Image (cartoon, rainbow, N blue to C red):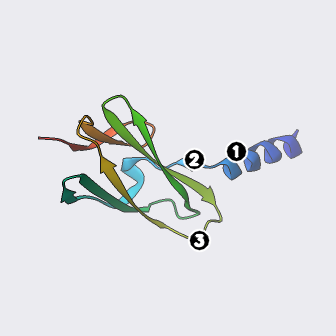
Amino acid sequence: MLVWAKSALLSILSLGTVLEQHATIDLKVEVRREQPMVVKVTGGCGHSSMGIKKVVQKREGSSIRVLVYLRVGEPEGDFSTEITVPDDVRQILFGKRGQVIFSRP
């Protein structure tokens, strides 16, 4: 049973988990350009044993969600992504929880 549990845990960790805003170090959101609007999102991973695997942007209606995937053993602890924000996008969300990190005025 212990071997199965260890195998299952390693499988889950290798797939990765998603960084949430509360576990992000120095999360910064900066408007880089107005037309077309480009927003830069940067930060660091607050999990000591995990690093950044990849950053994904997903369109969800009038929002864009930023998902920062983590994995044990990844060497990179910081992330940076630039998002081109179409006129019909009202906000940018972060993580699976969908914390609003940017809203149009």
Q: Which mark is residue 12?
A: 1
Q: Quadrant of residue 98?
A: top left
The residue lying furthest to the front in this view is 35
Q: Earlier in the sequence, mark 1 or mark 3?
A: 1
Left or right of 20 on screen, residue 76: right
Q: Earlier in the sequence, mark 3 or mark 2?
A: 2
Residue 69, position in %: x, y?
A: 54, 51
The image shows a total of numbered marks equal to 3
Q: Which mark is residue 99?
A: none
> Can you identify the residue that label 3 sits on?
75
Dot 3 amino acid type: Pro
Contact (Cβ within 8 Å) of mark 2 with mark 1: yes
Dot 1 amino acid type: Ile
Sort mark 2 into few (<14), some (14-19) or many (20+) by Cα contacts within 10 Å. some
What separation in Å lies between label 3 and label 2 (alpha carbons)?
15 Å
Left or right of 34 on screen, residue 38: right
Front residue of this view, candidates 30 and 27: 30
Sort mark 3 into few (<14), some (14-19) or many (20+) by Cα contacts within 10 Å. few
Q: For the N terminus, which image quadrant?
A: top right
- Under tag 1, what secondary structure? helix
Dot 2 amino acid type: Thr
Q: For the C terminus, which image quadrant?
A: top left
- Under tag 2, what secondary structure? strand
Left or right of 42 on screen, residue 34: left
Picture residue at 78% right of the left edge, 42% below the top:
8
Contact (Cβ within 8 Å) of mark 1 with mark 3: no
Please, is residue 11 above or below residue 31 in the view?
above
> Can you identify the residue that label 2 sits on?
17
Q: Earlier in the sequence, mark 2 or mark 1?
A: 1
Picture residue at 53% right of the left edge, 64% below the top:
48
